[in-house]
Amino acid sequence: MSGLRVAIATCAPFPPVADDEGPLRAAFAARGVAVDDVPWDADVAWGAFDACLIRTTWDYQERKDAFVAWAERAAEETLLLHGPAVVRWNTDKRYLRELEAAGAPLTPTIWLDAGEGADVAARVREAGWGRAFLKPVVGANARETLRFDADAAGLAAAQAHADRLLLDAGEGLMLQPYLESVERDGERSLILVDGAFAHGVRKIPVPGDYRVQDDWGATDVPWLPTAEEQALAARIVALAGARLGEALVYARVDLLTGPGGERWLNELEIVEPSLFFRHGPA
């Protein structure tokens, strides 16, 4: 027995999924590490654990500031993976702007700032997009996303959506072209551990939908990325590590397919991603 005790940070609304998180717990058990599932906002002494691994804290988007504050407190008491700097940076999708500036191939994005009005129709027409997509800079599980056509009805709906979030809710937004390829190819995810490729997953939405989360009926299957895709994912993770000044223990790189078949970065998940251990338990 190692004698180590590790907390796995969860949240009450979303208990760990056995078939996805089970292999992780089995690996800890095989090494004699005691594991406790603990909701991140529970009143516990985090110093009682040798480390805390953030996993299924999927309600953070509703209380982002509280979640970041928790990470800062927990890191003062124990080894938190990943630490508060990562949590603060990666829970706001504006981190993607920094990765793009560093050379990552991001899906074309127009950034709309909270509290400022935006003429969605003008932006979409200027970009030349026939269909477009809105999503908040803080969010998960396709929360408050909108796919819309660049016709009168679609643009009116998008403007109302943007006004509600930008002006009423005070949320920033990302405006992007809608990639039809997601309905055909889904989203491709590469899971990396200590910067090295571990396994890949393709997440497939239900026909006609774009949402690749299982809450929306999507499915996922094992997927083997090409050497070029693996190199791209490793480069993106290295860029993030350099920006944050620390090595990343785990990461999930989500890629979408552009109109020319190119791979574009959709998300880099390094706080609480599903790592699909059921497709790559090693």
Image (cartoon, helix red, strand yellow):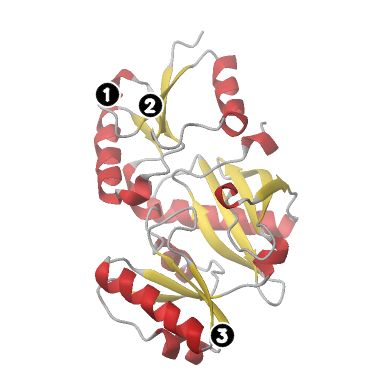
Q: Secondary structure at mark 2?
A: strand
Looking at the picture, tell me which residue is in the foreground, 12 or 35: 12
Residue 241: percent from left, percent from top: 46, 51
In the displayed structure, 262 sits above or below 46; it is below
User: Which label is found at residue 129?
Assistant: 3
Residue type at the position of mark 1: Val
Number of marks in the rendered image:
3
Q: Report if the CB atoms under discs 3 and 1 are less than 8 Å apart.
A: no
Circle 1 crowding by C-alpha within 10 Å: few under 14, some 14–19, many from 20: few
Q: Which residue corresponds to mark 2? A: 38
Task: Say if residue 189 shows up in the picture.
Answer: yes
Q: Which residue corresponds to mark 1? A: 44
Q: Report if the CB atoms under discs 2 and 1 are less than 8 Å apart.
A: yes
Residue type at the position of mark 2: Val
Q: Earlier in the sequence, mark 2 or mark 1?
A: 2
Residue 116 is drawn in which quadrant?
bottom left
Residue 198 is drawn in which quadrant?
top right
Distance from disc 2 to disc 1, alpha carbons, whole Å, reads 8 Å
Residue 83: percent from left, percent from top: 36, 40
Q: Residue at x 42, y 43 (%)?
A: 58
Circle 2 crowding by C-alpha within 10 Å: few under 14, some 14–19, many from 20: many
Task: Say if residue 113 shows up in the picture.
Answer: no
Q: Residue at x 46, y 55 (%)?
A: 240
Distance from disc 3 to disc 2, alpha carbons, whole Å, reads 45 Å
| Quadrant of the drawing holding the C terminus | top right
Q: Residue at x 28, y 71 (%)?
A: 114
72 vs 127, left or right, is: left
Distance from disc 3 to disc 1, alpha carbons, whole Å, reads 50 Å
Circle 3 crowding by C-alpha within 10 Å: few under 14, some 14–19, many from 20: some
In the displayed structure, 92 sits above or below 3; it is below
